[in-house]
Amino acid sequence: RPRNCSLCRKIGERRIILQEGLVDDMRNQFEKQLQQLNEDLISMGALCKEAVADAMTALLYSDKQARQKTFLTEYEIDHKERDIESRCLKLLLQQQPVARDLRLISSALKMITDMERIGDHASDISEITLELSSQSYIKKLDHIQQMAKETMYMLVQSVDAFVNKDMDKEVIAHDDIIDELFGRVKKELINMIHENAEVGEQASDLLMAAKYFERIGDHATNISEWVIFSITGEHPDDK
């Protein structure tokens, strides 16, 4: 009987070792999948930045090549969103993550929705440039250009923060800058319409383009807030 007990104990110990090894293997596999998720998000963020930059180039210089590139990049963004969504759902179903990992994956799902909308708006801006391509602009586009730069800064900083798990909350403050710039553009264009009704059509197109950049800023803010949630477990809107 003592021999049997000793044998049972050894078998039990081996079983525990095997189970622990299996758990370690599963965790290692999970970590690899999370790393791939980070890389996918970085790639999608870069595509969004590229789309916004090309849309601004198309608007500033009536650049046909930049306009076409924006449309192609939007297609890539849509494809990347589906890939990341599929990866996140597999992680949720196969790994059954808890606590912090669950927040990270659910935040990623929210972020890619906003990124996809950024791609849509960049494409919308490029479509507007089709209407403006044969016209001389009624005003300088420096404020609109600055709006584009602010949105790209917010986007890049937020994605980097998600990967590095370190979010500077000051990034969100840049949305206030974007809103202020949009207010200036809106006021200038409305005044121009009041002074000369003939510029109304182009002023409306430029105002719409500025509005799309303002919406891109809102989506960049959403991304920043979901990054904060993924790190802290608290969403800024819940406070």
Image (cartoon, rainbow, N blue to C red):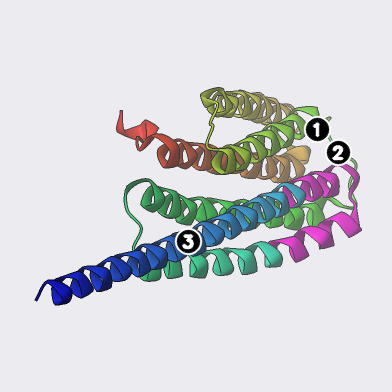
The quadrant in which residue 80 appears is bottom right
- State the residue in front, 19 or 183: 19
Which residue is nearer to you in this view: 169 or 103?
103
> How far is the residue under mark 1 from the one under mark 3?
47 Å
- Give the class, few, some or many, for how many residues have Cα within 10 Å of label 2's Cα (few <14, many ≥20): some
Closer to us: 230 or 118: 230
Determine the secondary structure under disc 1.
loop
Q: Crowding near pointer 1: few (<14 within 10 Å), some, many (20+)?
A: some
Residue located at (36% from left, 58% from top) = 97
Tell me residue 55's x, y (percent). 77, 49
Label 1 is placed on what type of residue? Leu
Assign a secondary structure to mark 3: helix
Residue lying farthest left?
A: 1
Q: Which residues are magenta?
A: 51-74
Q: Can residue 61 be seen in the rendering of this structure? A: yes
- Residue at numbered disc 1: 141
User: Could you tell which of marks 1 and 3 lies nearer the N-terminus?
Assistant: 3
The residue drawn where x is 30% and y is 28% is 239
Front tag of 1 and 2: 1
* Residue type marked 3: Phe
Q: Amino acid at mark 2?
A: Tyr
- The percent coordinates of residue 137 (x first, y second) are 86, 38
Main secondary structure of the magenta stretch: helix
Tell me how far mark 1 sits from mark 2, CA to CA: 8 Å
- Asked whether the viewer can see residue 92, the reply is no
Q: Which residue occupies the foreground of this view, 159 or 164?
A: 164
Measured along the vertical axis of the image, is residue 45 above or below residue 82? Answer: above
Q: Residue at x 58, y 69 (%)?
A: 83
Instruction: Name the residue carrying label 2.
Output: 137
Q: Which residue is mark 3?
A: 30
